[in-house]
Each structure stands twice: as structure tokens, then as C-alpha cells.
Amino acid sequence: MFSAVSLPSAGPLVSALATVSKFIGISASIAVVGALIAAGFLLKDEAGKLSYAGLAMRKVILWSAITWAIAAGGNIIFTLANILGEPLGSVLDYVTLKSFITQITLGQYLLFQLLIALFIASLAMRIQKVGGANLLTIATVIGILSPIFQSHSASSGSHALAIGSLCIHVIALSFWVGGVFALALLEPEDRAVAASRFSALALWSVVGVVASGAANAWARLNFASAWHTTYAFVMIAKILLTVGLIYIGYVHRKNLTAKAPQSINWGKFSQLVLAELTIMIVALALGSWLSVNRSPVPLGDEKFSAATTVAGLPMPGDPTLSRILFLYNPDALFLGFLILAVALYVRGVMILERRGDKWPLNRKIAFVCGIVAIDYATSGGIGVYAHFSFSYHMIAHMVLGMVAPIGLVLSAPITLALRTLPQGRTHEERGVRGTLVSALHSKIASIWVNPIVALVLFDGSLFILYFTSLFGGMMQSHLGHFAMNVHFILAGFLFFHVIIGVDPNPKRVPYLVRIVVLFAAMSIHAFFSVALLSSSTLLDGGYFAQLHAPWVTDLLADQKLGGSIGWAMGEIPILLALIATFLLWVRDDSHEAKRIDRNTERMAAMGQPDELAEYNTYLANLAAQDTKEG
């Protein structure tokens, strides 16, 4: 038997207001995303600056963000009323509200969303360039996602799958629905420019919506026993609406690819967009209802488990070789980004091969190794046991921060992007490729690729993470654990990009400096490992003790084992990078010598010795003159 479990309720009126505020907030935030991507991506830019049509979207961004902020404020009040099961008058108390938004995690996330909405509203009318629109898009998406990490999915035993798939679902839906909303607002001539580019974006978004929605439904529902529940009926209705939207999207894409822009009936196109937008609004309303009601849970199966409650995973058995190699619990958020990265990389390689160019096999292999390493350290056996043991956490850390980044750096993803991303649609437009080039040559990029900055982020952040309360706090939540793993990957990628990277670097440093930085990294990492080994107190803030893993009998010994593992696994990649740097130095010197020799031969064949030869002749003449005078 299954029961549909809901939040504690302060009454039907408050529950209805909570659903309405959630719907308005979701719709307004998606409108912000749509207006931002229209301004920064769909419409033409003028050398990186927003066009007139792009600047006009700023008012849409402003009022949508204000609406979002109002709905987010109401959502805080209605959520608190439902949690306490009291009428609105009882929760409109300063002390109660302050305690909720400062001490309760859900309240903190809801407050963060409110602040993001206010932040977007304050900057909406100041956007002038494509880069600013793109940065605000990222901020908006972060604001939309923040409460998800404390949603009903967070209490699921498979919350890595439930939360991750829901995040991907919301991101893809925001771009899809937001893009349709933006198209509906554009003038016909601007819509003709934006429609083809949105068609490509919508295709990627639809795939994300369908795949993540299926994964989330599988994680939250047992369809064999839950068909009779209202929750299941609402979800099925949402699925049917999504199928209808996919069909409309197919019609859009078919018309856009089969006809020239000037031959398309934009009047009928607009009517179809409005119908699509109406269906999307209904689907969002159903999604809002689902978000304030828990999925059906089996009666009698609601048993407390420290592992599931704290780590979000069932306690695995004693670590054996077969479990470490074959155990798999998908972290859908990481998995989704990895699948997207693979799809984009494969697409880039295919574009090159259609042109007749070949992408080196060793770069393809390096990319596969990097992606597999990340997946294994987040969803595989090591990733699972990393939630329950410090020593396995350190193995996962070393794989994510030391091993995987080397593979990604050697796969040259930036070079591939520069060679395959679309250029501007006009001579004045910077386009996607031009935006990337501009970002690579920006002042911020030159700061990031400074070897000292890369070293501080790579090794210096270890002391901030592990020798403060930050580590224990981040391990307590899925968001914190996700952010920590992302930091490991990005810090490692940046460091090895500076040292052995084959991608363009706006501020490439001499090989001698790279070798010095590598020796410094090796020394700092060794010092960090020794500090772990000599520590007499636990660094996790009691996190691992809450789990009561039966195969971890001594937490302090396990922590010291993690220090030993970090020392061993950390030194080897750095040593390999040191050897690679030395070989690159020798190869570059050899290439330079060959270049000089070729230049000398070429100039000699033309009867014109090169500058070096002329200088040597000059020195020889001076020596001969000194000899005569002597």
C-alpha cells in the first residue's frame, strides 16, 4: 500500500497560497531566464554589446525579477506556516521569521533565492554586454535551484538521483519554457533571427527534460503500486502535456529547417508559440502542485536510517574489491553534466571530421579517461564509500583533483571549442566563439591562469577546507558535497592547465617557473598530508560518527589512513606532471633549434645570412681586429 504524504498544513487556504506563490515564482524566474538568454544568445549582438532588441528585454528582466522576489518572499511565509501548522498571523513574527531564515537550512535556501531575485532586479537595467547577460543567467539558474536541495527529494533514500535529476529537469525546463516565452515577446523581425538558434537550444533542452523527468519519476514513484494516487495522476498529466510540447517543438524545427526565413508564415508561427506557452503554463502549474506534495511512500517502510538520513544513501556492506569496482549509485547531477560534456565533445569532433580534419586519438582517449574517472569517484564504488569513510573520501578527492583533471586538460576541450563553436551571424556579431575568445583574453582570465593563483586554489584551499569547520558542514548536505567535488575538479583542471595544458593560455609562463611551481605544490601537499597524519582530533565535525559504519571501527585511524593515501596519491600525479613539463621544455627547445636552422638555410639560399649568423660574423671580425692590434 502507498500513501500520498504531504507537508504539515496550516489549512487549505495557506496550502493553496503556497502552491500559487510557488507557481508565480517558478514562472517569473523562468521568464527571467528566457529574457536573459534572448538578450545574450538568441538575438544578434554588436561586437559583444547588446543590440537594441536585447536592451529592450531588460524591462522584462526587471519586472519578472521583481515578481519573482515577491513570490519568493511569500513562499518563505507560506512554507513556514505549513511547517508549523499554524495560521499566517502566528508566523508573521520577527523572531520566528528570523529564526527560520537564519537557523533552518530550508529557510536559508529560500532566503538565498529571494536575495538572488533582488540581485537580478537591481542589475537588470545596467546590463550592456553579452557577458553580463550570461553571468546573470548563471546567477538566476543558481537561485532557481537552491531550494531543490531541501525539497522532498532530499529526504529520499536515493536523493543523489532524485535531487540531481530534478535539478537537471529544472535547468532544461527553464531554458525551454523561457526561450518560448522570449520568442512570444519578440518583434517579428527579431523572432526570425532568434528562432533558428532557439531551435537548437530547445532540442538539447527537450532531451534533458525527458531524460531527467523519467529518472526523477523512477526515483520517487513505484508505478507498480502507485497508479491510484493523485500524485501519480498529476505526474501522468504532466507527461502527456510534455509529449504535446515535444510534438509542437518538432513542428517548429521541421518548418524552420525546411524553409527559408523569409518564406515562413510568422503569423501562424506566433499562434503556435502562444499555444505552446499556454500548455507550458499548465504544465508548470502541475509541477508547482507536485513540488509542495510528497510522492507516495510505502506504508510501513518509513524506517529511520542514519545512513539514509545523513548521507542520503543506504549503508553499503564491508568494502570488498568487487563492491568497490562494481557498486554504482548514480549522482544524477554529476552524471547529467558528464553526459552533456561527452555530447558536446563528440559533436565537436564530428564537426571537425566533416570538414576533413582529424582530432588526435590521444586526446580522445584522455577525455574518456577523465570523464570515467569523475564518474567513478562520484557515482561508482569509490564515490559511494566516500560518503561513509574519510579514507575513501580522500581517494575520491585525489581522483577528482589529481587524476581526472590531467585527462581533461590533455583532451584540449578549449581548443576543440574554439575550432567548432559557431561564429557570429554577421560581421558585427561576436557570436559564441567570439564570446569565448573574449573571455579567454579578459583580465579575470589572466588572473586565474597566474601560477600563484592556481597553486593557492589547488593546494592552499586544502587547509581551509579540512582544518576548519567547512569540511564537516559541506559533508552534511548534498549541495555542499557537490560543491566540494566541483571545486576539486576545477582547481585541478586550472592547475594542470597552467602547467601542462595544450589549450590556449593568455599568460603562459616559462617552463622553469612551472617546474618551481610543481616543486612548491609537491612540498605543500606533503605538508598537508603530514598535518593530517599528526592530527589528534577528528576534522569532520562529527559527520562520520553519525553514520555508525560497522566497517570503520576507529575514525581517527581512518582519518590518518586518509592522510597517507592523500600523500601517496597526490605526489605521483605531480611527479608525472614534472616529468611531462621537462619533456615539453626539451621538445620546445628542439623545435626552436630546428626553426633557427631552417631559417639560416633559407636565408643562406637567398644569399642573406640571418641575424644570428651576422652577429657571429661581427664578433669574429672584432676578434680578428683585436689580434692584429695586439
Image (cartoon, rainbow, N blue to C red):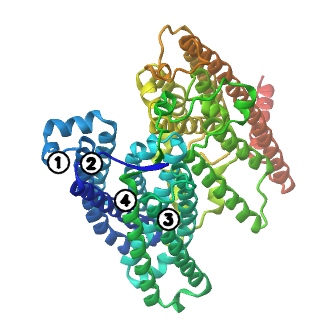
Q: Residue shown at 65%/57% (left/top)? A: 343
Mark 3 crowd level (few <14, some 14–19, many ≥20, 10 Å Cα): some
**Residue extending furthest front?**
1
Mark 2 crowd level (few <14, some 14–19, many ≥20, 10 Å Cα): some
Give the CA distance from mark 1 to mark 3: 33 Å
Give the CA distance from mark 3 to mark 2: 25 Å
**Residue 108 coordinates in the image, percent (x, y):** 31, 40
Element marked by disc 4: helix
Can residue 387 be seen here? yes
Give the residue type that dot 3 points to.
Answer: Ile
**Residue 274 coordinates in the image, percent (x, y):** 40, 80
Q: Earlier in the sequence, mark 2 or mark 1?
A: 2
Q: Which residue is mark 1?
A: 87
**Residue 567 coordinates in the image, percent (x, y):** 64, 18
Q: Earlier in the sequence, mark 1 or mark 3?
A: 1
Q: Earlier in the sequence, mark 1 or mark 4?
A: 1
Give the residue type that dot 2 points to.
Answer: Ser
**Residue 258 coordinates in the image, percent (x, y):** 62, 85
Q: Of 171 and 554, which appears nearest the observer?
A: 554
Side of 249 where 349 appears, left or right: right
Q: Which residue is mark 2?
A: 9
Element marked by disc 3: helix
Q: Which residue is mark 3?
A: 236
